[in-house]
Image (cartoon, helix red, strand yellow):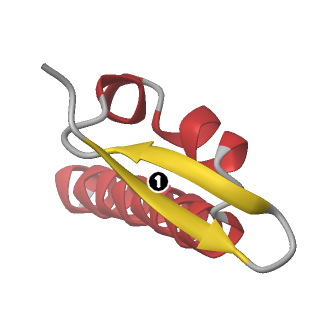
Amino acid sequence: MKVFKVYKHPVSGYEAVKVGFSWPGFFWIVTWLLWKRLWGIAGVWFLSAFSHVLIVQAAEKNQEADGKG
């Protein structure tokens, strides 16, 4: 049995929102965030992913430099 909460927006009207875990949000994080218009959280996710890539690349370069020296 699914449980929903109903919210009322003064302009958009009523909307039923399912309570519980979101499997699409788990498997397709960025697509789900953008689909739900969670721009700020999607931006933070992109920045953290980009920072992670930069840190990993810097660590690999550091290991290569230590191995050659």
Horizontal arrangement in the rendering, residue 65 relative to residue 8 (left or right) = left
Residue at image point 19% right, 42% down: 20
Q: Residue at x 49, y 45 (%)?
A: 16
Quarter holding the C terminus is: bottom left
Residue visible at 63% across and 63% down? 38
User: Where 61 falls versus 26 (above or below)?
Assistant: below
Disc 1 is placed on an element classified as helix
Amino acid type of disc 1?
Val
Picture coordinates of residue 11, whole percent (x, y): 87, 74
How far across and down, in percent of the image, does residue 61 sit? 39, 56
Q: Quadrant of the N terminus?
A: top left
Mark count: 1
Asked if residue 58 is positioned above or below residue 44 in the image, the reply reads above
Q: Which residue is mark 1?
A: 53
Between 24 and 13, which is closer to the camera in this rendering?
13
The residue at the far bottom in this view is 10
- In the image, residue 64 lies at what x, y percent? 30, 50
Left or right: 68 with respect to 39?
left
Q: Within 10 angstroms of label 1, few (less than 14), some, or many (20 or more) residues?
A: few
**In which quadrant of the rendered view does residue 10 lie?**
bottom right
Q: Nearer the viewer, residue 45 or 57?
A: 45
Q: Position of residue 18 (x, y in %)?
A: 35, 40
Q: Is residue 14 left or right of residue 52?
A: right
Which one is in front, 20 or 15?
15
